[in-house]
Structure formats: C-alpha cells, structure tokens
Amino acid sequence: MTASIDHYAVLGVDSDAQREDIHRAWLAAARINHPDALGDVNEVERRAAARRMHEINEAWRILGSPDLRASYDKTQQRNRDRSKPSLSEWTEEFSEMEASDPPGFEVGNPFVATALRALPWLVIGAIGIGIFVFSAFATNSRPERWTPVTEPPSDRCVVVRDDSVRSVDCERKSSRLVVDSFDIGSAGECPPETESVQARKLMEIYCLTAVEEDGDPS
C-alpha cells in the first residue's frame, strides 16, 4: 500500500464517499483510461496510460476493501497530523522572538538601534508639521474677503472689482462715490455725469462718480 498517493483523488471522489460511489468512479475511470481504449498511440503514451490504469486499479483495491481503506485512512490522517506544527511549537518559537527586533535582524550599534526605534515617531511628527505648515500657508494665502455693499447710502464710497461693489473709505485710491442705486430691471436711471455699474450678484445698479482728493465729487 502506497500512502503517498491520494487514492481518493485518483478516482475523483471524496474521502467520505460510499463504497458504491467509489466503485462507479473506478469503472468510469477504467473505461476512459484503459490502454486498449486509446487506439493508435505511440509507446510513450501507452506506457503513461498503463501507469495511470495501475493507479486506478490500486485505488480501487485499497478503497474497495473496508479493512484496507480503514488502514489507509489512518495512515493519511497520521501523515497530515505529522505535517502540522503543534500549538506548543508555535508558542515556543514566538516566545523566543524579541518584540523589538525582527527575526534575522540585529543592530550592533546602540545609536543606530535607538534611531530606528524612534524613526516611526519622527515620521509621524514630520507629517504633523507638514499639515500645520500647509494649513497656515493656505489660511494666509486666502484673498481678502470681498464684502459687497447691500444698500450703500448716497454718501458712501466704493470700489468696483469684477462686477462686485465693496464699501471703502472715500480717501482710498480709486474709490468712487455712490450717487444713487436701484434694482436691475427697474425704471431707474443714473444721473448725468455718473457711471452706471451693475452688481449682478446683488441685482443692483450703482451710479458712481469720481472722488476728488478733498472728498467732494468731481
């Protein structure tokens, strides 16, 4: 009896298959693999078929006998148990390992060993600093908030940027005086000598005029 060969696999059945199922599997395998069923083949193929047929017949001889099958199953189970490491072996091997040093890796220089142990914390710290610097840069690089004028009085000064109107001090350079304002689509009109500026976001039209250095409209 050859314990290294899986007779169940040879016949294509499970290890808990009934004898009738094993017998049917043996007949089917013998019918397909018998050398006489090959026809005109070369010698190499015929010898391979003969070896295959021998394995099929041997599998049926072992598995078809209750006593031989029981002995075969015990041998196979013993071989499987022998190939599995016991829990105690795993525990002993694991206990011999040092948590700080991976297997097969030793550092003789204590300074290098200390640096390696601190490396993960240094990386985490560098990432944190990078996030802080990026956040600070992003905050400082934000453009000046543009505060639109909702209802500017007639004596307020504004600057216009991209169809947006911002209230500013009249002494600021490029500021203009708001003479009047009305809703877009209304019948209002800007007075002569003023510039009509549409603030589309506010749906407003502003009538603006330049501001002289003394604060009086030009």
Image (cartoon, rainbow, N blue to C red):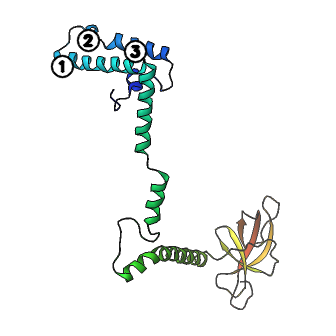
Q: Is residue 41 above or below residue 148?
A: above
Q: Where is residue 199 drawn, in percent x and y?
A: 72, 66
Q: CA distance from mark 1 to mark 2?
A: 11 Å
The single residue placed furthest to the bottom in the displayed view is: 214
Pointer 1 residue: 44
Instruction: Answer whether residue 85 is visible to the viewer in this image.
Output: yes
Pointer 3 residue: 26
Q: CA distance from mark 3 to mark 1?
A: 24 Å
- Give the residue type at disc 2: Pro
Identify which residue, 109 or 156, lies in the foreground. Answer: 109
Q: CA distance from mark 2 to mark 3?
A: 15 Å
- At 30% across and 11% down in the image, what residue appears? 34
Q: Where is residue 162 drawn, in percent x and y?
A: 64, 68
Classed neighbour count for the residue bearing mark 3: other residues with Cα under 10 Å, few (<14), some (14–19), many (≥20): many
The quadrant where residue 42 appears? top left
Q: Is residue 29 above or below residue 107?
A: above
Q: Where is residue 6 drawn, in percent x and y?
A: 38, 29
Identify which residue, 87 or 121, lies in the foreground. Answer: 87
- The C terminus: image quadrant: bottom right
Instruction: Answer whether residue 193 is visible to the viewer in this image.
Output: no
Pointer 2 residue: 35
- The N terminus: image quadrant: top left
Say whether residue 144 is left or right of residue 93: right
- At 79% across and 58% down in the image, what residue appears? 185
